[in-house]
Amino acid sequence: MRFNEKELVFLSRQPSERAAELSMKGPKKGDVMKKRLVKLIVNFLFYFRTYEEEPIGALLLEQCRVERENDLAFSITFLDEAEREYLFECNSREQCVEWMDAIVKASYEFMRKNLIFYRSEIHRMTGKDPLEQYGISDETRFQVSNALPPPPP
């Protein structure tokens, strides 16, 4: 996927859902742990040198796996590039759990599945499709694998 560098820099300056200085190791052979300012913004994980304002990199958090490595560390790998692994070390076990949870919940697919689940629940409880009022109820991206049940009589 291609990104416009100016747009990414602009996005990196937006308020973040989570930000902290973490130790980070990239996927290149010979990479070592380095302190980085890490910011989660929408579904991007930006990382900065601690003294710079522009990011040195960004990870699109789609089609990735987040795994705990130990009490203080977690890794991110990408499903289409298993060898591309990023390792992050936190200051506490709690911080590690919070970061892992936030990263998992940041993906578009996670948000889409939640929207479909709650849409189905609201439809089941009220008999009405909550997306209908926005004119997007028929969009494929918001469809459950099978059609919503008909409203109760």
Image (cartoon, rainbow, N blue to C red):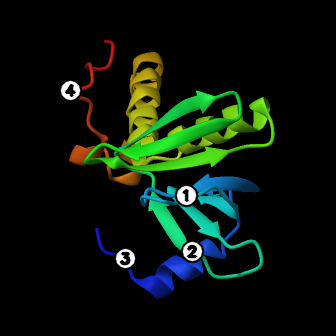
Check disc 1 and give the amino acid type: Val
Residue at the (26%, 37%) spot, across then down = 143
**130 with respect to 57 (left or right):** left
Q: Position of residue 64 (x, y in %)?
A: 39, 44
Q: Position of residue 90 (x, y in %)?
A: 73, 43
Residue pointed to by mark 1: 42
Check disc 2 and give the amino acid type: Leu
Measured in 3D between alpha carbons, the distance from the residue under mark 4 to the one under mark 2, in whole angstroms, is 36 Å
Measured in 3D between alpha carbons, the distance from the residue under mark 3 to the one under mark 1, in whole angstroms, is 15 Å
Q: Secondary structure at mark 3?
A: loop
Q: Nearer the viewer, mark 3 or mark 1?
A: 3
Q: Nearer the viewer, mark 4 or mark 2?
A: 2
Residue pointed to by mark 2: 11
**Can see residue 19?**
no
**71 with respect to 4 (left or right):** right
Measured in 3D between alpha carbons, the distance from the residue under mark 2 to the one under mark 1, in whole angstroms, is 9 Å
Q: Label 4 neighbourhood size at 10 Å, few (<14), some (14-19), many (20+)?
A: few
Q: Secondary structure at mark 4?
A: loop
Quarter of the rendering containing residue 142:
top left
Of labels 2 and 1, earlier in sequence is 2
Residue pointed to by mark 4: 147
Q: Quadrant of the N terminus?
A: bottom left
Of labels 3 and 1, earlier in sequence is 3
The single residue placed furthest to the top in the displayed view is: 153
Callout 2 touching callout 1 (CB < 8 Å): yes
